[in-house]
Amino acid sequence: MIEIRKIESSRLPSTDFSALEFGKAFSDHMLICEFKNGEWGTATILPYQELNYPLSLHALHYGQAAFEGMKAYRQINGDIALFRPKMNFERLNRSAVRLAMPEVPEDVFMDGLKKLIDLDREWVPKEEGMSLYIRPFLFSSSSFIAARPSESYTFAIITSPVGPYYTGNVKVKIEEQYTRSAAGGIGFTKAAGNYGGAFYPTRKAVEKGYTQIIWTDHKDHRLIEESGTMNIMFRIGGTMRTPPLSERILAGITRDSILSLLRSWGEIVEERPITVDEVVYAAENNYLEEAFGMGTAAVVSPISTIGFRERDFEVPNSPEGIAVRIKKALNEIRTGKVADENGWMLKV
Ligand code: COI
């Protein structure tokens, strides 16, 4: 059962969809469901608003917090559809287990999500390349500062209309000092702290003229892992190569979808450890054909330059390239321009 309390008047008329900054405008409603005394309460959809929490809020001190990122799309016939939402639900619960948080019930996540998007369907942009970014998240909400798991938790969903995630030229630096995740750690989760911990090394890379970091392994920085907040893919000598999933790498839903598409197109796809050396060698010898990040926000983010130690390597990025083809194909499935053969879209 989902309880619904509607807004009195929508903020839609005062929201300028032509000037949206990523994640700054929020739709009329949000969903909240609280876990207390060992059980989940009733999920409630209510007007988007600020909530009051004490400064002893557990999540602020110990970071028992994880999130998801997903999108609702407006299709060419006017329908609203979500892209593979069950995968976000399952991944949130994998994060919950690793962070010692209670798993969110499927009906709270899936039914709550569908009802929320249905209620705010006018917030799903009609313009080409735009969508409604959905942020489900779970955090510890007891008010005590003893260093042990919280007793209460809050699951919430907020949504934000977004435009194309334009990043311009992406110049990435192969990181050899800092680490995003380690063996036995929480790299495979969407823990809030994984992102907070990345800001400082990323800022240092930005100060050197790069946009993002290519994360390498925690042991000796010889293996490529991720790029910024995204999974990474290379096209080297005609084959598509991406690092295999592990406890250190986030199981990206965009990554999974791109791998399926590439295989269905007959591309040779390798999911295997990729060394820094093989990428640098390919770049030096002109057979690094493409490199791109894969994630929910940008979908595909082509890399134009890879920096390694004191050298910068230019990476080809043609409008006829595979990155552009993938982005177009995913967009056509999401907007209903082509048949959804994999059953990825869930209509709201
Ligand atoms: C992604 O799409 O790469 C994300 O995880 C986005 C988010 C951190 C804004």
Image (tube, rainbow, N blue to C red):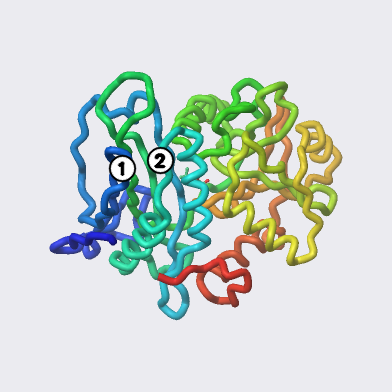
Q: Amino acid at mark 1?
A: Phe
Sequence-wise first label, 2 or 1: 1
For the C terminus, which image quadrant? bottom left
Residue 61 sits in which quadrant?
top left
Horizontal and vertical percent for residue 193?
A: 46, 30
Say which of 286 and 245 sits in front. 245
Residue toward you, 267 or 141 = 141
Q: Position of residue 45 (x, y in %)?
A: 25, 57
**Residue hosting label 2:** 102
Q: Which mark is residue 35?
A: 1
- Image: 23 above or below 58: below
The reply, left or right, for residue 277 in relation to residue 63 is: right
Label 2: few (<14), some or many (≥20) within 10 Å?
A: many
Disc 2 is placed on an element classified as loop
Judging depth in this view, the residue of 47 and 207 nearest the camera is 47
Q: Cβ–Cβ below 8 Å for labels 2 and 1?
A: yes
Task: Determine the CA span between mark 2 and mark 1.
Answer: 8 Å
- Residue drawn at x 62%, y 35% is 247
Answer above or below: position of 43 versus 54.
below
- Under tag 1, what secondary structure? strand
Percent position of residue 44, x then y: 25, 55
Residue in the image at 28% along x and 61% along y: 1
Name the residue type under label 2: Pro
Question: Eyeballing the image, is 77 above or below 271?
Answer: below
Q: Is residue 52 left or right of residue 215?
A: left
Out of 113 and 38, give the one closest to the viewer: 38
The quarter holding residue 310 reads top right
x 70%, y 35%: residue: 224
Bin the neighbour count of mark 1 within 10 Å (Cα to Cα): few under 14, some 14-19, many 20 and up.
many
- Residue 116 location (% of width, % of height): 32, 61
Q: Residue furthest left?
A: 8
Q: Give the left or right position of residue 99, taking residue 205 as reference.
A: left
